């Protein structure tokens, strides 16, 4: 029998305890030993719960308990769980965590501290999808060329609604909040931060890159309008919030932003709250992993898979490799990335305006791929929609500043990166 | 350093040797040790090859060699490799195989013989997609409710062509043969046998069912016509060759056949030679794993992933569990499965014919969901297309026999199962 303690018994923690009890026979057959949840730690013992295991409000006592052999960390937050996970590892107790924020900031220190003690985190990225296992194990023969993931269900739900029903951002956000898909303060999801934490974890397994959230481009979906969605469709794109990590000349680009992707690609077909991660390996080609990215039971499914692996005696290095993974592939600075871009401008409808816009782009070394003029709801104005050939982010940023300074161009310029 | 011997150095074996050499540093970083191919066994030493490792035509000598620590079996066939794999395991040497036919017939004996010696087979199902790892490890907390897989690239390529271009079976087969996607004798692929071998392997991991190919329904795509494809489209279906394993009341249905599936489902969107396996777990919900199901490098990617797992010291039970997995879920006999059905009949265009067809169906307890009459190219005939509500296979078979015996119905009746 292997005894498990759970730090943080919220939605996921309750699911972990319940599934371990309800699917006990099956899990024992797969793990080779009975796995039993014996103790949970919660902040507030007075809150009524029905989890079928004893509870404490002292997380240190849970880790210290001679009864607890594996520690499951589901608390949320960064520094609190960091201290506790370190303590468990130093006590020689394997840890399973679903905490992406913890790993986004401290995965390398934790790998160091863990050493040979298992520290598993399948649930931290894309919920129930076993993408960590796929990258650490299933694709281990490959240099990873790119990872493109829909890793935030809230954003994908909202974008799907906007695409399929033409609703605007504010209405769909309200609806998502009513359905419980978005928080009252939705910034962490719609601003791309949640997806960024996950991307950083995948980037470490694929490329061994120790980046923090502040090192990469993180943008959300707040600026996406029905016009953009409609334009995207006309040009054969869908708009998705993607986490992208890819090898380019001299480094690895990592970024999270709303992205126009070809409507025919597999990942463009992922709708609603579902998540998916497309991984291109130099030998295997494109693979994609699809499933629910959130939810108590789906996340608990990944947590328990990790516990089973530990009980089977399987370890392997935490981040999937034992020493420097590849040299010569540093993180590319945000301003140095290259992309194709979509630009939406509102300009005064007057002769010569188009010429001054296009010449401003040209002066910044930006070459136009396609252009569309549409009527604007504002009198005497028109909308100009461009897609560009690939150029450097810094040049695009400079061009946008220059466009804004033109008297005939409205301040509000939308820029969406295109990924083919 | 860990030394690998390769039994069978064809397309996949050459890729394994080449990738181990070309991606050596990366694989060493991930495995923790250098992995080196040291010897290959081939049938015909006189055939020119460029694989960069010494070759022998004596597979027994390869296994006996003190230099070979892990044996990779890529020979094809059943009884020859069975003897050699047993020999390697009995000598205490871990084995990696891509041989689905071997496993379709002998996986339970091999699990017994392997005991604690690793016997891995990620490459045996769906080529480069790490689906075995997902089922054995990533989804281990779940009772598996269903597995539905597109596991034969030849069939999926052909059906995609038929769907997208309206080509008929014979033309698309010829084209697939010219492109090297189909063999001169295509039966193994288009008849569903290849997919069946793979399904049986997945069925063992998910349900612990020891079935052989002869125990399950295996049908191919040879009977699919452009009319069926067109009808499917009109009713919102796509036709795919699916391997299906699913829990039903009192057992598990396993079958391989052309299937009409809702056009909006993720797996219906898998086109061309690509493979995908959708797995529904009782806790995680639906997940899907997508990628290349064949090809030297993609298959070698999976073979090497297994080697890395062995070198890391990870094992776990071969089929994913250590004792009887679940009781009370035997294989449902082929005649006892339940499905919705599509039927296509050619009948004489005469009053009363429709009544006699529908009453024949009614007498066999089959209830019609939708009906369509279309003109036939044969004079004085029409086509009747039905979909039915769910009924037992035995009743459908009896109804088809009864319909054939009607004088007004042409002998050639097409039946395609529908899966929602």
Image: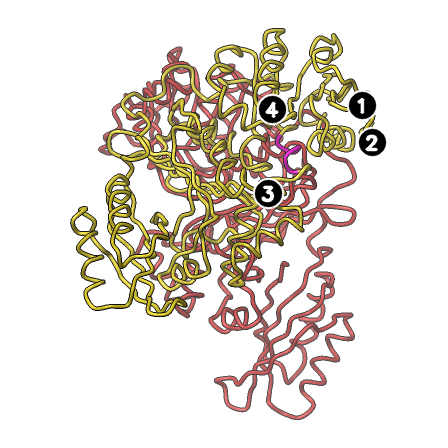
Chain colours: A red, B yellow
Badge nearest the viewer, 3 or 2: 2
For the residues labelled 3 and 2, the Cα–Cα distance comes to: 25 Å
Which is nearer the eye, A231 or B198? B198
Asked whether, in this view, residue A402 is left or right of residue B206, the answer is: right
For disc 3, the marked residue is B292
Q: Is residue A340 left or right of residue B286?
A: right
Q: Quadrant of residue B89?
A: top right
Q: Quadrant of residue A158?
A: bottom left
Residue A420 image point, x, y percent: 64, 59
Which residue is denoted by mark 2 in the rendering? B50
**What span is colored magenta in the figure?**
B298-302
Where does residue B255 sit, x and y in percent of width and height?
39, 37
Note whether residue A233 is visible.
Answer: yes
From the image, give the main secondary structure of the stretch colored magenta.
helix
Mark 4 or mark 3: which comes first in sequence?
Answer: 4
SS at mark 1 in the image: loop
Q: Residue at x 59, y 7 (%)?
A: B90
The residue pinned by badge 1 equals B45
Answer yes or no: are tags 2 and 4 on the same subunit: yes
- Looking at marks 3 and 1 on the same chain, the residue that comes earlier in the sequence is marked by 1
Circles 4 and 3: CB atoms closer than 8 Å: no
Q: How many marks?
A: 4
Disc 4 target residue: B97
Kindly identify which chain the residue marked by label 3 belongs to. Answer: B
Which is nearer the N-term, disc 3 or disc 2? 2
Tell me, yes or no, whether the highlighted magenta stretch contains residue B148. Answer: no
> Which element is circle 4 on?
strand
Question: Camera-side residue: B419 or A333?
Answer: B419
Q: Chain of mark 1?
A: B
The N terminus of chain B sits in image quarter: top right
């Amino acid at each position: 029998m292997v005894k498990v303690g759970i730090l943080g018994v919220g939605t996921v923690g309750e699911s972990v305890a319940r599934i371990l009890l309800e699917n006990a026979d099956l899990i024992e057959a797969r793990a080779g030993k009975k796995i039993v949840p014996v103790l949970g730690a919660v902040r507030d013992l007075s809150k009524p719960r029905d989890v079928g295991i004893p509870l404490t409000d002292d997380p240190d006592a849970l880790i210290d308990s001679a009864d607890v052999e594996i520690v499951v960390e589901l608390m949320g937050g960064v520094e609190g769980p960091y201290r506790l996970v370190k303590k468990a590892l130093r006590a020689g107790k394997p840890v399973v965590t679903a905490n992406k924020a913890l790993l986004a900031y401290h995965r390398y220190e934790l790998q160091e501290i863990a050493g040979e003690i298992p520290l598993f985190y399948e649930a931290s990225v894309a919920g129930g999808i076993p993408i960590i296992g796929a990258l650490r194990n299933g694709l281990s023969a490959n240099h990873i060329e790119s990872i493109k993931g829909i890793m935030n269900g809230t954003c994908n739900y909202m974008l799907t609604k906007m695409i399929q029903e033409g609703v605007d951002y504010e209405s769909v956000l309200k609806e998502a909040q009513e359905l419980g898909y978005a928080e009252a303060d939705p910034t962490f999801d719609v601003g791309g931060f949640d997806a960024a934490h996950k991307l950083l974890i995948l980037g470490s397994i694929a490329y061994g890159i120790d980046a923090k959230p502040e090192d990469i481009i993180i943008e959300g979906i707040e600026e996406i309008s029905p016009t953009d969605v409609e334009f995207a469709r006309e040009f054969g794109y869908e708009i998705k919030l993607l986490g992208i990590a890819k090898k380019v000349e001299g480094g690895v680009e990592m970024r999270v932003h709303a992205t126009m992707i070809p409507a025919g690609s597999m990942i463009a077909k992922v709708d609603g709250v579902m998540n998916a991660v497309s991984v291109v390996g130099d030998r295997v080609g494109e693979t994609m992993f699809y499933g629910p990215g959130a939810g108590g039971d789906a996340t608990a499914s990944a947590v328990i898979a990790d516990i089973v692996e530990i009980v089977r005696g399987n370890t392997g290095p935490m981040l999937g490799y034992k020493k420097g993974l590849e040299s010569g592939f540093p993180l590319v600075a945000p301003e140095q990335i290259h992309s194709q871009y979509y630009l939406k401008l509102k300009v005064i409808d007057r002769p010569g305006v188009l010429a001054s816009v296009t010449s401003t782009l040209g002066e910044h070394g930006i070459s136009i791929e396609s252009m569309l003029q549409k009527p604007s709801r504002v009198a005497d104005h028109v909308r100009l929609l461009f897609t560009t050939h690939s150029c450097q982010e810094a040049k695009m940023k400079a061009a946008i500043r220059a466009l804004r300074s033109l008297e005939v161009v409205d301040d509000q310029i939308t820029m969406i990166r295109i990924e083919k």
